[in-house]
Structures are given as structure tokens and as C-alpha cells.
Image (cartoon, rainbow, N blue to C red):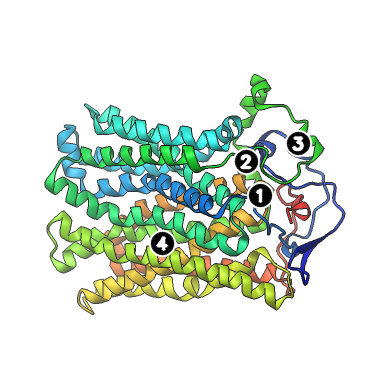
Amino acid sequence: MAIVRAQPDHHPVKVAAPSSASSSADSDTEAGRTAAALPPSDQAPIPLQTSVQIDDKPAIPLPGWKRWFTLFSICVAVFPSNFNNTCIMSAVPEVSADLQTGEHVVVAANAGMFGAMALCVFVWMPLGVLLGRRTAVLVANAVVCACSLISALAPNVVVFTAFWLISGLTTPFLLVAGQTILSDIFEPTTRGFATGLILGMSTIAKAIGPLSGALIVTVTSWRVIFGASALVSFTALVLCFFFVPSATGHGPRKHPSEIQAQPTARRGPLEILLMFNPVAVFRPMKDPRVVLTHLSCGLASFNLYSLLSSIRSSVAPRFNLTTPVSSGLFYLAPGIGFLVGNLLGGRLSDYTVRKWIVKRGGMRLPSDRLRSCLPATLLLAPAGTLAFGWSVQERAGGMALPIVATFFQGIGLMDAFNGLNTYAAEVVPESRNAIISSKYLLQYTFAAAGVGISPLLLQNVGVGFTFTLTAAAAMIGGILIALLVVSGSGNGVALPRFKTNCGSKENGSRS
């Protein structure tokens, strides 16, 4: 166990159990160690539930102004990640007519986007190691810009779908890299707010996408959607070029074995091929904390995408909404809730961390920030989901009740995502790249399930029972978060102990 105690001069002192493992300094190489240089699997297991995280100094010290410009650059970069596929929800007839294909083909292509986003981790995690994090971020922005532009100019559905899927395969990497960058430049007591901003930008894109798509196809061509996305990605490319730092040479001291590691340029073909081994993505899931975090994120994502994919089909018949714009207006309520939830959730998360540091006399646990998620996941999100579903089903509360319900549902979901995403970046910092990547694999898999299942449920069991199921998913996620909090606090509830590589180095974290 490692403990941090705050001294009178406010400089934390680390007291760590002897360990042969050292801390990771460079996020550019952490995923490579996961993929190609893993320690022996017969290492002694450690008690996962009582480890204390020591990560209180940023690995890359930057001036305050540059940190916020870096944050702004990442926020711009992640915006296209969910904008295109939600915009198309309101433009399917126009896209299919222009490309001379059936609407079901465009819908299937949109569903394929989620599959491509889930597979992103298998391609871009090793590429991030080979290229280096900063270079990979620049290349990813360039790929998204080029693919969006080609999709906007596509002469047929084959070209359109192919480059749209390549874009989907790339955009989640910007979220993963963005969160690892924030973990390197922000202290834990402000990290939650910064994470909330980039997640807020991503989720706002989901919420305003359908309305934006409806407005665009009403006044101009659907191709403007992808042209605008290309412009945003190009802007992000320029901003990231100037403001995203390189991790090389700026982190804390490296272990001698890392300093003598083989340079990326000298890797052999077999070593490069082994870096694409998908087993490396699943290896962090040996840690039960990682599994519970991923499942909680997945269940929240199932709730979120079940709502976004069902609003038009459930609300339009109830209120006789016949145009894309009128139906798209209903997406504003959860969208505003997403923004409020991210901003408030980030501040509340950071406040909770500071409060518990004081309560323990200077000791910080990674699970402290998850305490702020519990009211949102156990009460706010499930209650908002149930109120929306049954108010539409029973035609109660007019138009106001569903709007208010989705607003509070959005707040609850984003509060949960904020704490979980920040916790995922902190729980095992030397493996954060692999952990965040595998999290998005599960998260988008659950999202695809929500998009695919909810329309079928609406047709067979009705709106009320459909959203009862999604509310139950959110509540189960809250129970898993509560388990993480209780087990992490050392109050007698212990998670199972595994032999795990991703947790074996935790006692050597930065201080």
C-alpha cells in the first residue's frame, strides 16, 4: 500500500511499500509496454481494493494559459466524434435519395459506425505507441478531416460508407488521447472539471446533431454536414499542432529499463506486428476495478443511446410532430442536461476529492471522486428515464414533463461519465492508455446494443417498459460504482484478488 500524507509545507510525501516496479512517465510508451513488454504473469498478486493512488503532480508541467489552450484544442478535436452519425439520424431520406440507395442502407451504415468506433482501440492504441501520442493525435485529426471531406463529395454510397467508417474508426482515439493528455497536465483536484469539458463537447455533439441535421437538410444539402465536420477537424489539427505537448522528455524520472528500451524507429517487423495483438486491450480487465468501471460506463452508455435513438420514434406520435425540425427540438433538453451535468459533475468530482483528502489528513484514494456519482446514477438518471418513458406512454404531463425528465436524465448520465472517465485515467496511471481504450470498446458495444434493441422494444412492449429497462441499466451501473467506492475505502468489502499485470506497478506511481 502507498500513502500520501500532507505535511505542513504542503509538499506531499510518499510512503510506498517496497516494489520492484517503477512508475510510468510517458504516456506515449505505456500502451507499448502493455502490448509488447508485459511483466511475467506469475508475479505475486496484490490487494487491489486498498491501493492508494499517488498521482498528485502533473507529469508534464505547463504554464496555466497553455494548459487551458491544450484543453480547448482537445475539445475541438473530439467534437466530430459523435456529430456526423447523430446528424444523419435526421437526414436519412435526403442522403438515400441523393446517393440513389435505400434508406435501410444508410441506417445500416450509421449502425456500422458504432462497430467501427468500438474497434478503434485495436488499430489506434498500437499506432499511438508507434507514432508517439502527439504525432498520433495530429495524424488522427488529419484522417478525420480527409475522410469527412471525401464523404461530403462522395459520388455513390460505397465511397460514402467506406470513408465514413474510416472516420468512425479514428475519432474515439482522440477521446482516449485527450483524457491521457489531461491526466498528464492537470492535478487531480482540477482534473475532473477538465475531463468534464471534453466529455461535454462530445456529448453535446450527440444531442445537437439531430437538430443540426434537420436544420441543414431543410435549408441546404446534407453534404454540408460532412463539410462542416471537415472544417472543425482541420481547425483542431492546427490547434493541436501548436498546443498539444509531447510527453517525451517532460515526464518524471524513468526507470533505467525504460531509458534503454529500443527506440520506436528500430522496432522489428515482428515486434510491430505483436503490438497489434488484441489481447493487450483485454489484459487490463484482469483488474476487477477496471471491469466494474467499464461495465458502469457501458450501462450508462446503453441508457444514453437508447434515449437518443428513441426520442423521435417515441415522441413524434405522442405530440403529432411531422417535421424533422420539430422532432429534433426534443434533443435540446438532454443536450443542455449533458452540458450542465459535465460542468457541475466535474466541479463536484474535484470538490469531493479535496473534501476527502482533508477528512483523511492528506490521503487520497482513486475512488473518492466516484462518491459524487452515486446520487446521479442511483437516483437522478433512473428517475429521469422512468419519468420520460411513462409520461409519454400514459400521455401525462403534456410536453413539459418529458422535456424536464430528459434534462435531468442528461445531468445524471454526464455526472456519472465524468467521474468514471476520470477514475479510469487515475486508477492505474501507468496503464491508463490501455484502460481508457478498453473502456471505449465496451462503451460503444453497449451503445450499439442500445441503438439496436430500443426500436424493437418500443414496437413490442411500448415506451414505458422500454425505458424501465434502460432505467434499470443505469441503476445497476450505480450499484457497481457504489461497490467500487466501498471496496476502495478499505471498509471491509474486498474485491477478488487476481494476478494482474496492470495493477502490479501501482505502488510506484508518481508523487
Mark sitting on residue 157: none
Q: Quadrant of the N terminus?
A: bottom right
Dot 2 corresponds to which residue?
A: 247
Q: Answer with the quarter of the image where residue 207 lies.
A: bottom left
- Identify the amino acid type marked 4: Asn
- Which is more N-terminal, label 4 or label 1? 1
Q: Amino acid at mark 3?
A: Glu
Residue at mark 3: 258
Residue 110 is situated, as x and y percent measured from the top left of the image, at 32, 42
The three-letter amino acid code for the residue at tag 2 is Ala
Q: Secondary structure at mark 3?
A: helix
Direction from residue 358 to residue 450 in the image, left or right: left
- Identify the residue position indicated by label 1 in the image: 59
Q: Nearer the viewer, mark 2 or mark 3?
A: 2
Q: CA distance from mark 1 to mark 2?
A: 8 Å
Mark 1–mark 2 CB contact (< 8 Å): yes
177 w.r.t. 210: above or below: above
Q: Name the mark nearer the viewer: 4 or 2.
A: 2
Residue placed under numbered mark 4 in the picture: 303
Q: Secondary structure at mark 2?
A: loop
Q: Residues within 10 Å of mark 1 (few under 14, many from 20)?
A: many
